[in-house]
Image (cartoon, rainbow, N blue to C red):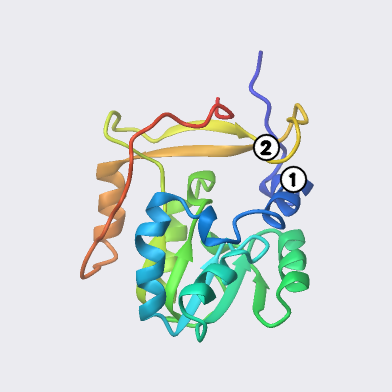
Amino acid sequence: MSRPIVSSTSEWAEHPELAGFYSRHRSRSEDLYPSERRFLPWLARQAATVLDVGSAAGGFLNMWRQYNPAVTYTGVDLSASLIDAARRRHPDATFLHGDCPAGLLLPDRAATVVQALGWLHWEPRYGAALRELWRLTDRYLFFDVRLTDGSDQVLTGRQRMVLLNAWDGRTTTPYLIVPWPQMASLLIACHPDTLLGYGYWGPPADTVT
């Protein structure tokens, strides 16, 4: 049987499961994953401004302000429906619609911290995305990826869209696992002063094929 796919990124990005899930979850410090908890409180103490690329419904605004009430937060997302949800939930913050790998209409060094969590493993243009994220940061780039040391090729699959309800039998996203040497080369090309990492080995989610 052929693997189910959607016709375009814009279709899965506007799937109602995303707005439903991110309007209810990923908005409290208790929702942070261990790798996020390792860095976000420390980064918040250093940050005057945060640009959250892939901001979903804006839940991370609450987390940044928990650790630094004075921080200025701006969110960007590919999904227009998520941006609408974020603006309704957080009228005191700025939310912009944009496609990071294609380039965002923001100046160089736009924020002290640029965050990109939970989506680079869905983005086939991850190299272009990382270069754009690096352009936008004034000091820190905070992101997560899926890595492997067991292959010299990018491993590609599909992830079923299952967040609140049963899978609809159709909607999937890309799922990418990048060899560490390839990711290291991308990062070195950005000429960072320091790389800090925190990770853990494990299989992909059971929604990945």
Q: Is residue 97 left or right of residue 188?
A: right
Q: Which residue is mark 1?
A: 17
Residue 15 placement (x, y as % from top left)? 76, 47
Residue 103, quarter of the rendered image? bottom right
Whether residue 115 is situated above or below residue 1 in the rendered picture: below
Kind of residue at badge 2: Met
Q: Nearer the viewer, residue 1 or 149?
A: 149
Quadrant in which the C terminus appears: top right
Q: Residues within 10 Å of mark 2 (few under 14, many from 20)?
A: many
The residue shown at (74%, 73%) is: 87
Q: Nearer the viewer, residue 192 or 92?
A: 92
Tell whether 174 sits left or right of 200: right
- In the depicted structure, whether residue 97 falls above or below residue 12: below
Residue pictured at 26% horizontal, 61% vertical = 189
Q: Identify the image quadrant of residue 177.
A: top left
Is mark 2 in CB contact (under 8 Å) with mark 1? Answer: yes
Q: Amino acid at mark 1?
A: Glu
Q: Left or right? Give the position of 168 relative to 195.
A: right
Residue extending furthest toward the left: 193
How far across and down, in percent of the image, does residue 152 sit?
29, 33
Q: Position of residue 202 (x, y in %)?
A: 38, 32
Q: State the SS at label 2.
A: loop
Residue located 48% across and 32% down the image = 156
39 versus 122 height, above or below: below
Q: Crowding near pointer 1: few (<14 within 10 Å), some, many (20+)?
A: some
Secondary structure at numbered mark 1: helix
Task: Name the residue carrying label 2.
Answer: 161
Q: Earlier in the sequence, mark 2 or mark 1?
A: 1
